[in-house]
Amino acid sequence: MISEAAIARVAAREAEHFRSVNPRAFAHRAAATGWFQSVPFHWMKDWPSPVPIVAASAKDATLTSIDGQIYDDFCLGDTASLFGHSPPALAAALAKQASEGLSYMLPTERGAALSTRLAAMFGFPQWQVTTTASEANRAVIRWCRGINGRAKILTFNGAYHGAVDDAFVDLKDDAPAMRASLIGQVHDLRDTTTVVEFNDEQALTAVLRGGDIACVLAEPVMTNVGMVRDAPGFLQTLRRLCDETGTLLVFDETHSISSGYGGHGAVHGPTPDMMVIGKSIGGGVPCAVYGFSETVAARMAALNMSRPSGHSGIGTTLSANALAITAMDTMLVEVITPAAYGHMLRGAARLVAGLEEEIAGAGLDWHVAQVGARVEFLTCPTPPRNGNEAKAAMHPELEAAIHLFLANRGILLAPFHNMMLVSPVTSEDQIDRLVGAFADCVRALKE
């Protein structure tokens, strides 16, 4: 219902407008020649604007650029700042910790308190800290292979687990295939990773009953290929099959922590054997955690007793540094609360209702998906059931035009897909501005 010509016309007009109001962003690119491709990390080039917006500051759910543009921020650092930018309690705690030392390679009293808070919130009695969720996933995979004595892991096509090599296997023509975009990969990951479609109980059953899978590493809801919800009963079947085959079940809840207090597993079930949480747990300070049951902890301890001393391949010097511990402890006490989730879920419901009303009014065959405080509009008529359907439904040019249109009107979405996050400090006015700008964009595309 929206022509390619209309998409190109809107995209060109919005790009020209962006150039006219963001001169300092272009000057910044010209000056940043010491960075490869003018950015300190390559995915900062993935925004749909002609050059990346250059941030000057951010507070609560608002971001200000060096060009003085003020944005209602629904990207929130791609989940890193899910609970708002620089909550006052966190800023104060970090400043105090900075004056007392940042990294000791020693435990702290605050770390002991944090471990009990993690257990209370997420329901797992044992925890470890890493610097990123990618690192946590790598550690969990090693532990699962070590304690299960099995080499293979199972992932779902299109799921996202950070920069973990083992997860970069896709399905192509119903067969596992190395992801073509992976730079410098020299080992065939298919020897130790297999992949099936999300929500495919038949394929899942066949693979797990082969008896050679150490763990299933899963997002309980896929969030990085659009959004793919679990079919009714699928996760319960996954849990049952893992129990039946002695396979460990790992939920990567780095994104699905948006579902509610305690994460998706705590809110909706089932309970995995291990879980990973990154990004937002420290309010934007680099850190992540993984939790596990007492049964898994006992098996990990036995594995440690059986191996020679020395490097385990798990951890880095900065893991569990004092700044990260302070950040997480402060977030769990002061910021990531049931009341915060109440605000987030009410705001997300308002956003969903507003977007659905505008989509219906425009006669578009699009739909809106929601996982707690995480909302996406998808430019396809029915919700995708798996990764391949989600990829097929994507329209990169259309999405880029919408994102740039919204950015030019002070609305910031995540650059990679149509993801919007509602924080505890996102206001109803911000949500209503997003819905209004979305409606204006749809009208412009249909002119």
Image (cartoon, rainbow, N blue to C red):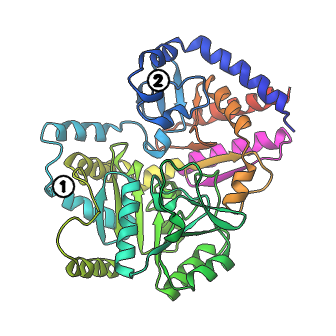
Q: Residue 317: where, in percent of width, then height?
A: 21, 52
The residue at which mark 1 appears reads as: 110
| Real-space Cα separation, disc 2 to disc 1, in angstroms | 35 Å
**Residue 264 in sight in this render:** no
* Residue at image location 59% in from the left, 79% down from the top: 207
Mark 2, residues whose alpha carbon is within 10 Å: few (<14), some, or many (≥20)?
Answer: some
* Residue at image location 52% in from the left, 74% down from the top: 270
* Residue at image location 53% in from the left, 56% down from the top: 160
User: Image height check: is 5 above or below 388?
Assistant: above
**Viewer-nearest of discs 2 and 1:** 2
Q: Answer left or right for 324 relative to 420.
A: left
The residue at which mark 2 appears reads as: 54
How many numbered marks have been drawn onto this rendered protein structure? 2
- As shown in the figure, which amino acid type bears the numbered disc 2? Val
Q: Where's the C terminus, which quadrant?
A: top right
- As shown in the figure, which amino acid type bears the numbered disc 1? Arg
Towards the viewer: 110 or 55: 55
> Residue 159 lies in what quarter of the image?
bottom right
Mark 1, residues whose alpha carbon is within 10 Å: few (<14), some, or many (≥20)?
Answer: some
Q: Residue 354: where, in percent of width, then height?
A: 70, 41
Secondary element at tag 1 = helix
Q: Answer left or right for 192 relative to 8.
A: left
- Secondary structure that dominates the magenta span: helix
Q: Which residues are magenta?
A: 345-372
Q: Where's the N terminus, which quadrant?
A: top right
* Residue at image location 56% in from the left, 81% down from the top: 208
Q: Residue 445: where, in percent of width, then height?
A: 80, 29
- The tag earlier along the polypeptide, 2 or 1, is 2
Towards the viewer: 316 or 258: 316
Residue found farthest to the front: 186
CB atoms at circles 2 and 1 under 8 Å apart?
Answer: no
